[in-house]
Amino acid sequence: MSFAFVVEDGTGLAAANAAASVGYVDDYHASRGNAGWTAEAALAISAVDHTADTLTKAAHGFAVGDGPFCVASTVALPAGLEAGVAYWIAAIPTSGTFKLALTPDGDPVALTSNGSGTIALVPVGVKAAAIVRATDYVENRYGNALVGYKASAEQALHFPASCVYDPISGDAITGVPDAYQKAIAELALVARTSTLGGSPGAAVSSESRSAGGITRSVQYATPGAAISYPAAERWLRSLLRRPQAVRA
């Protein structure tokens, strides 16, 4: 089963559900040695035919709409494809060839070169889903406290926004702020293995009371501590109207 994974590209997409691409989050965690964000197993591509817009993998078993995938190369990608961008299977001319699209039901991407080096297709469904959940969490938890105003009423996510400025230089920030994407990356790491914002549980205390020679034990449930995500919160701090709103 495929699902839509639409990364906000800075133009205010109405269908966007992710504030950072898989490639961005991969690079973020790789640069920090975060082993919890591991690479997905790559599927080797044996040939590319840009004249037919096809990639070849023997007996691939794909169905139209499968994905998302990223495409990687040790040297150069086929022209028309971009690193870190999500693609879906758009068409299957033969049992060993397929075409890629930018959406589950989109038109095939036009290729203008075969690329070079070792080319591979990388399933990123688990990562994409974690990024979507991280984006949902930030938009729902901090949406009303984020600086600026949506660039258009139709866009799905808060950013891009007007009236957003760099706190040091004072320059206007356009598109999706880098700090916002870094917060999404931190939360996606958590979302890959657990539920964001889930209750840590209530603490239980007890005491014994005696009256008339009868002793009774009474238990009290007290709220557990609020869950916070310090690494993500540090990135978000400069993007909130009220810094104290950082705590979850």
Image (spheres, rainbow, N blue to C red):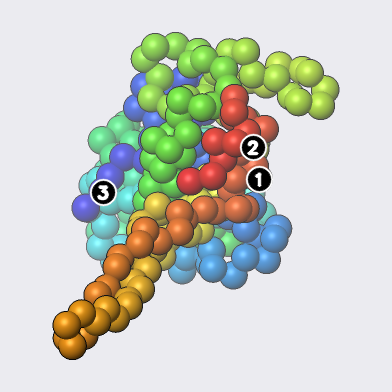
Query: Of circles 1 and 3, which is in front?
Result: 1
Task: Name above or below for residue 31 compared with residue 151.
Answer: below
Can I make out residue 223 in this image? yes
Residue depicted at x 70% and y 19% = 165
User: Where does residue 108 sit, x and y in percent of width and height?
Assistant: 35, 35
Amino acid under disc 1: Arg
Q: Secondary structure at mark 1?
A: helix
In the picture of the structure, the residue carrying the numbered disc 1 is 234
Residue depicted at x 52% and y 15% = 149
- Camera-side residue: 78 or 20? 20
- Disc 2 to disc 3: CB gap under 8 Å: no
- Disc 1 to disc 2: CB gap under 8 Å: yes
Label 1 vs 3, first from the N-terminus: 3
In the picture of the structure, the residue carrying the numbered disc 3 is 2
Say the numbered circle drawn on residue 237. 2
The span from disc 1 to disc 2 (Cα, nearest Å) is: 5 Å
Amino acid under disc 3: Ser
